[in-house]
């Protein structure tokens, strides 16, 4: 297990991307750092969440400021929350990608040695950094960490656009779970 962890760490931390100012040619100039989020990342995480939820549309400054305040109030202790883990990719000391996992604890069973699974959410990479392997490297780090923690599986509800990304990274369709909509004005 240790050698697999080391190979993922090396792959993640030594991942080289050819990124110039326009990000459209491949010149090796820096490394992408992949790590767990820290408390000092909270504003950057809020910004990326805003961009994910608004599909990168121009900002509504007042609404955005209110959202970021709410986000920062809701997730003040991200380093101490074992049930929700945020992973980030950093380029030139700026967070460019995020992926969050909510760990769900199952009722123990004598026939099931695994007591948790993960729900993958909040997956976002800044547009100019997409299709460069950053999301896959981030997901490799997450899969490795969750395997060490003995999580049984990782689930995601992908959009049609993101489905090929997940499929390339080992996810496969399973029979859909049954879903009960509790709040009618929410879309599932």
Image (cartoon, helix red, strand yellow):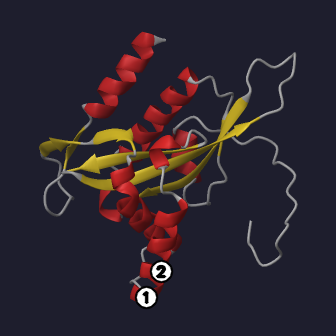
Q: Position of residue 175 (x, y in %)?
A: 82, 43
Judging depth in this view, the residue of 16 and 54 nearest the camera is: 54
Q: For residue 123, which numbered disc appears in the image? A: none
Asked if residue 80 can be seen in this view, the reply is: yes
Query: Looking at the picture, does residue 16 appear above or below residue 147?
Result: below
Whether residues under marks 2 and 1 lie with C-beta atoms below 8 angstroms apart, the answer is yes
For label 1, the SS is helix
Position of 138 with respect to 159 (left or right) is left
Q: Position of residue 184 (x, y in %)?
A: 83, 76
| Snapshot quadrant of residue 6 | top left
Residue at left offset 87%, top offset 52%: 178
Find the distance from the CA under tag 2 to the CA under tag 1. Answer: 6 Å
Asked if residue 55 can be seen in this view, the reply is: no
Residue at left offset 48%, top offset 49%: 78
Query: Looking at the picture, does residue 51 appear above or below residue 124?
Result: below
Position of 36 with respect to 166 (left or right) is left
Position of 134 with respect to 178 (left or right) is left
List the residue tagged with mark 1. 62
Q: Position of residue 130 (x, y in %)?
A: 36, 56
Q: Position of residue 165 (x, y in %)?
A: 51, 48
For label 2, the SS is helix
Query: Looking at the picture, does residue 47 appear above or below residue 87?
Result: below
Callout count: 2
Judging depth in this view, the residue of 83 and 29 nearest the camera is: 83
Query: Looking at the picture, does residue 140 appear above or below residue 109?
Result: below
Residue at left offset 52%, top offset 48%: 100
Q: For residue 66, which numbered disc appears in the image? A: 2
Judging depth in this view, the residue of 46 and 33 nearest the camera is: 46
Quarter of the image where the C terminus is located: bottom right
């Amino acid at each position: 297990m240790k050698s697999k962890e080391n190979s993922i760490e090396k792959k993640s931390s030594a991942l080289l991307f050819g990124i110039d100012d326009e990000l459209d040619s491949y010149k090796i100039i820096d490394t992408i750092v992949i790590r767990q989020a820290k408390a000092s990342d909270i504003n950057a995480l809020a910004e990326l969440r805003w961009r994910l939820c608004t599909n990168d549309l121009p900002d509504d400054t007042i609404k955005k400021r209110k959202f970021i305040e709410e986000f920062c109030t809701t997730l003040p202790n991200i380093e101490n929350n074992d049930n929700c883990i945020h992973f980030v990719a950093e380029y030139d000391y700026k967070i460019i990608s995020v992926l969050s996992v909510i760990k769900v604890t199952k009722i123990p069973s004598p026939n099931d040695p695994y007591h948790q699974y993960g729900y993958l959410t909040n997956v976002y990479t800044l547009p100019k950094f997409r299709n460069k392997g950053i999301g896959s490297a981030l997901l490799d780090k997450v899969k490795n960490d969750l395997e060490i923690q003995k999580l049984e599986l990782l689930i995601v509800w992908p959009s049609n656009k993101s489905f090929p990304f997940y499929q390339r990274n080992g996810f496969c369709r399973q029979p859909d779970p049954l879903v009960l909509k509790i709040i009618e004005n929410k879309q599932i």
